[in-house]
Image: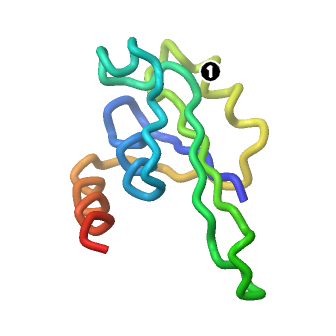
Amino acid sequence: MIIGTAGHIDHGKTTLVRALTGVDTDRLKEEKARGISIELGYAYIPVEGASGDSDDVLGFVDVPGHERFVHTMVAGAGGIDFALLVTLRYLICSVSHAARSR
């Protein structure tokens, strides 16, 4: 199953994906320097399937949230099954804290 992030710039989409998967989807130097996603980012985590097997994978496509990168957002939408709408950054802090305390 592939989940695409959705939300405005600086609402915590990348932070949420990092908290869930441990993968920083911002790979480019420019993304690190500016603190925003510019290109599509990808992460995945293995999950236990309905049969009890851990062979299933939950994938994430992290898209940029700035209006200047709409073409990149749309490019990432082609293969997603579900969208994860991220709207409030303070919720991300709670998710990140919860992920660290596991």
Mark 1: amino acid: Thr
**Residue 56 relative to residue 12: left or right:** right
- Kindly identify the residue that appears in the image at 39 percent across and 14 percent down: 29
**Residue 48 relative to residue 53: left or right:** left
Residue 1, compared with residue 61, is above or below; it is below
Residue 53 x, y percent position in the rendering:
73, 81
- Kindly identify the residue that appears in the image at 41 percent across and 33 percent down: 8
Which quadrant is the N terminus positioned in? bottom right
Residue 69, compared with residue 11, is above or below; it is above
Considering depth in this image, is 51 or 70 the residue closer to the camera?
Answer: 51
Residue 61 x, y percent position in the rendering:
60, 41
Q: Of all residues shown, which one is farthest toward the bottom?
A: 51
Residue 102 x, y percent position in the rendering:
31, 74
- Kindly identify the residue that appears in the image at 64 percent across and 17 percent down: 71
- Mark 1, other Cα within 10 Å: few <14 / some 14–19 / many ≥20: some
Q: Which residue is mark 1?
A: 72
- Give the colour scheme shown: rainbow
Q: Secondary structure at mark 1?
A: helix
Q: Of all residues shown, which one is farthest toward the front?
A: 54
Residue 67 x, y percent position in the rendering:
48, 18
Q: How many marks?
A: 1
Residue 26, compared with residue 83, is above or below; it is above
Determine which quarter of the picture holds residue 94.
bottom left
- Kindly identify the residue that appears in the image at 52 percent across and 41 percent down: 6
Considering depth in this image, is 53 or 85 the residue closer to the camera?
Answer: 53
